[in-house]
Amino acid sequence: MGLRRLIAIVLCLCVTATAETLDSAVEKKQRAEWCEALGKRLKSVDARLCQSLPFRAGTLRSVQGRPLMALEVAPAAGKNAARPVRILLAGGLHGDELTSISIVFCWLAFLETPAARAHHWYIAPLVNPDGLFARPSRRTNSNGVDLNRNFPTPDWADKAQDYWQRRTQKDPRRFPGKTAMSEPETRWLTEAIEAFKPDVIVSVHAPYGILDYDGASPPPPRRLGLLNLKPLGVYPGSLGNYGGVFKDIPVITIELANAGTMPRKEEQHQMWNDMLDWIDARLVQPRHTGKSPGAQRN
């Protein structure tokens, strides 16, 4: 598919026609600078395509003042008998896991498919921009906090510091912060979860080469592409703990096999298709039920 056609398809999926969502000159400039920087840092990110998409900055910025950008893609209009599933897709919580960012951009090309267009997407490709743009890139944000240990789980106050000191021997790469949700990047993603109310969260990491899952229901996917299910358990302040246990939102954690080398295109496509197959089988519900899949119970 040509670049122009892909841009047109993705743009037509997004709700951008109302006066409230029209881009200002400031927003366009901000997006252009963000996309250009990403294109220079990650060869697999096409800066032109990135700029053509209505990524929008949140109200919060990273510690170093970088915008935190996301793309919302509404389901295609039509007589769909099933209730659209709300999917939050996030990459780059750890700035040195480059493929976790790149593959989210690659997956944007698959949003044209009927299976993807049936659902509602909120896509945050880069949660930790300061970590990515550090030289060298690093896992933590600019405050030295592991964002995936900073979410406000109920056990954070009692267990986060103790876990870090005893289990990780004060590993600086896994410092949970001084308080839960102390970091603007964590607050931004938490606010997005509260506002968007996803039925499932898909968080992409690397390089363990496995599939992790947190949540009481539905049953997890056994496999996405070449990645087999291997539950890792939850940690104080992790997104899986916050979403899957505390908020009762199933969290799929994709651990790519390599942080610096992308999976083959065939594998990227297979992971995407397997993910959508699981969503269709486990989360799609008829409209007449009056209850969205994965509804929060707390």
Image (spheres, rainbow, N blue to C red):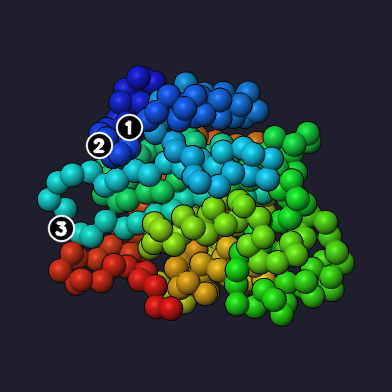
Tag 2 and tag 1, C-beta contact below 8 Å: yes
Tag 3 and tag 1, C-beta contact below 8 Å: no
71, above or below 175, in the image: above
Residue most extreme to the right: 169
Q: Residues under labels 2 and 3: Cα distance?
A: 26 Å
Along the viewing direction, whichever of 163 and 63 lies nearer the viewer: 63
Asked whether, in this view, residue 211 is left or right of residue 19, the answer is: right
Q: Residues under labels 2 and 1: Cα distance?
A: 6 Å
Q: Where is residue 122 in the image (x, y as percent from the top left)?
A: 41, 48
Q: Position of residue 262 (x, y in %)?
A: 60, 37
Q: What residue type is labelled 3?
A: Ala
Q: Position of residue 252 (x, y in %)?
A: 50, 60
Element assignment for label 1: loop
Q: Position of residue 212 (x, y in %)?
A: 57, 63
Asked whether, in this view, residue 79 is left or right of residue 86, the answer is: left
Asked whether, in this view, residue 119 is left or right of residue 296, the answer is: left
Q: Residues under labels 3 and 1: Cα distance?
A: 31 Å
Q: What residue type is labelled 1?
A: Leu
85, above or below 123, in the image: below
User: On the image, numbered disc 2 is attached to which residue?
Assistant: 18
Residue at 32%, 37% (x, y): give it. Answer: 21
Label disc, if present, on residue 69 of the rendered structure: none
Residue 186's image quarter? bottom right
Please identify, in this view, whether the residue under mark 2 or under mark 3 is nearer the observer.
2
Residue at 60%, 68% (x, y): give it. Answer: 152
Q: Residues within 10 Å of mark 1 (few under 14, many from 20)?
A: few
Label disc, if present, on residue 81 of the rendered structure: 3
Q: In which quarter of the image is the N terminus?
A: top left
Q: What residue type is labelled 2?
A: Thr
- Who comes first in sequence, dot 3 or dot 1? 1
Element assignment for label 2: loop
Total numbered badges shown on the rendered structure: 3
